[in-house]
Image (cartoon, grey):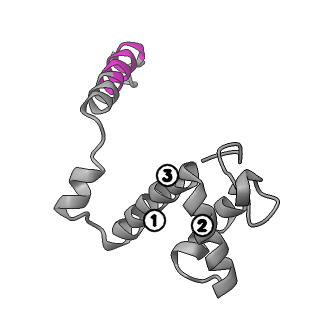
Amino acid sequence: MSDDQHCKGVGGAGHRHGISCREVSEFLLAYIERDLDEDAQAEFDRHLERCPPCVHYLDSYRDTVSLVHACGRGELDAEERRRHAPPEDLIQAILRAKRAKGAKGAKDAKPTPGEE
C-alpha cells in the first residue's frame, strides 16, 4: 500500500479532499462487505480510481479474506489450491530445516533411564 505519495487528488492536490491511504486500510473489510454508507463507499471508489497501490492492497486483502472463508469450509477447491499454493522452494527449505532440526535433536537427545 502507499503512504499517500503516489495518490493524486483532484488536480494533483493529494488528499486535501477525500480519504487517505491510511483511512482506506482501516476500513477495507467494511468496504469489501459494502457495510459503509453510500457517501463513504463513493469516497473509497474515488480514492481507488487514483491510487494503484491501494488497488493492489485491496486485491491482496480480498485474497486473504477469501482464504480465511475457505479455511472455515475446511477445504480449498482446486482453483484456490492452485492460486494459493506455496512456492516449491519454500516447501523444500522448510523440509530441509525440519530434517536438520530432527538430526540435531536425535544427536543431542539424552538416553531415557533404562536405555543406557
Viewer-nearest of labels 3 and 2?
Answer: 3
64 relative position to 96: left or right: right
Say whether disc 3 or disc 1 marks the residue closer to the N-terminus: 3
Say whether disc 1 or disc 2 marks the residue closer to the N-terminus: 2
| Amino acid type assigned to the residue bearing label 3 in the image | His
List the residue tagged with mark 3: 56
List the residue tagged with mark 2: 28
Q: Which mark is residue 34?
A: none
- Discs 3, 2 touching: Cβ within 8 Å: no
- The residues colored magenta run 97-108
| 35 within the magenta span | no
Residue with the most extreme front position: 11
Q: Work out how far the residue at label 3 is from the one at label 1, CA to CA, in angstroms.
A: 14 Å
Q: Residue at x 21, y 65 (%)?
A: 77
Quadrant the C terminus occupies:
top left
Say whether disc 3 or disc 2 marks the residue closer to the N-terminus: 2
Q: Which mark is residue 65?
A: 1
Q: Main secondary structure of the magenta part?
A: helix
Q: Label 1: few (<14), some or many (≥20) within 10 Å?
A: some
Number of numbered markers: 3
What secondary structure is marked by label 2?
helix
Q: Label 2: few (<14), some or many (≥20) within 10 Å?
A: some
